[in-house]
Image (tube, rainbow, N blue to C red):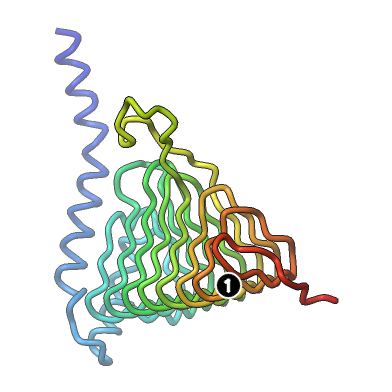
Amino acid sequence: MNSVAGKWNRDLLMIPAKLARLKEVFVTTLLGYLPTIALGVHLRKLFYPQIFAQFGKFVCIETDVKLYGTAGIEIGDRVKICSGVRLNTLGEANNRISLGSGVTLERGVDLGTLQNSCIEIGEGTYIGLYTCITGYGNIKIGKNCLIAAHSGIYGNGHIFADPLRTIADQGVTRKGIVIEDDCWLGHGVTVIDGVTIGRGSVIGAGAVVNKNIPPYSIAVGVPAKVIGQRNH
């Protein structure tokens, strides 16, 4: 009897989340594919604030943007989200995506929080075509950063120490990633879990960043190595 009562209580607690998700699906299905002309943009500006945690002024969301878990997504003023972008906070109540004012997400950008995690992108930052930012750990990208196309920022890694067990069964790391203000990551850069890239740094195209980069550094290669300083 107690187990039945417990199940009822859990089901009751889930009702608000299910209703919010139903509202989200209805609104985004109805409006998400309207062409990116005055009508589509205007209607999304009118109705999307009702389903997001925060929705700023002068936001432009183009057609065919995939949205999952909008109750956990915060959008500042003058944000531009281009066609083919996916934002996903589903799965955990504490998942959150925060886009500061003036952020641009180019076509095909994929942001996903996996487990009680947060992706925070600071004001004025540009995220290039088909970049993927995801992880079990928190990811913080500062203000006025430039992230070029096809980059990957992954806030977790797989544990593989035991050769007698499958890698999938050994769990993950979730140290998180910090990219400080005014950084430029070139085309195809990969940033590994646990890394901090210091303020004002430049990371060359194709680099794999698996260690901390000091502020105002120029780093290139696989793995990335510092070859110069911008403040000298």
Residue 180 position, x and y percent, is 65, 63
Q: Is residue 13 left or right of residue 196?
A: left
Q: Is residue 147 left or right of residue 166?
A: right
Q: Does 202 appear above or below 175?
A: below
- Extreme right residue here? 232
Instruction: Give the residue drawn at x 24%, y 80%.
Output: 63
Residue 10 position, x and y percent, is 24, 27
**Quarter placement of the C terminus:** bottom right
Residue 133 position, x and y percent, is 42, 61
Graded by Cα atoms within 10 Å as few (under 14), some (14 to 19) or many (20 or more), the crowding at tag 1 reads many
**Quarter placement of the N terminus:** top left
Residue 125 position, x and y percent, is 55, 75
Instruction: Give the residue drawn at x 43%, y 44%.
Output: 136
Instruction: Give the residue drawn at x 25%, y 67%.
Output: 66
The residue to which callout 1 is attached is 123
Number of marks in picture:
1
Q: Is residue 56 left or right of residue 146?
A: left
Foreground pick, 183 / 6: 183
- Element type at mark 1: loop
Foreground pick, 23 / 88: 88
- Extreme top residue here? 1
Identify residue type, mark 1: Glu
Q: Does 28 appear above or below 14?
A: below
Foreground pick, 92 / 39: 92
Instruction: Give the residue drawn at x 22%, y 17%.
Output: 6
Q: Does 59 appear above or below 167?
A: below
Foreground pick, 12 / 141: 141
Residue 134: name its quadrant. bottom left
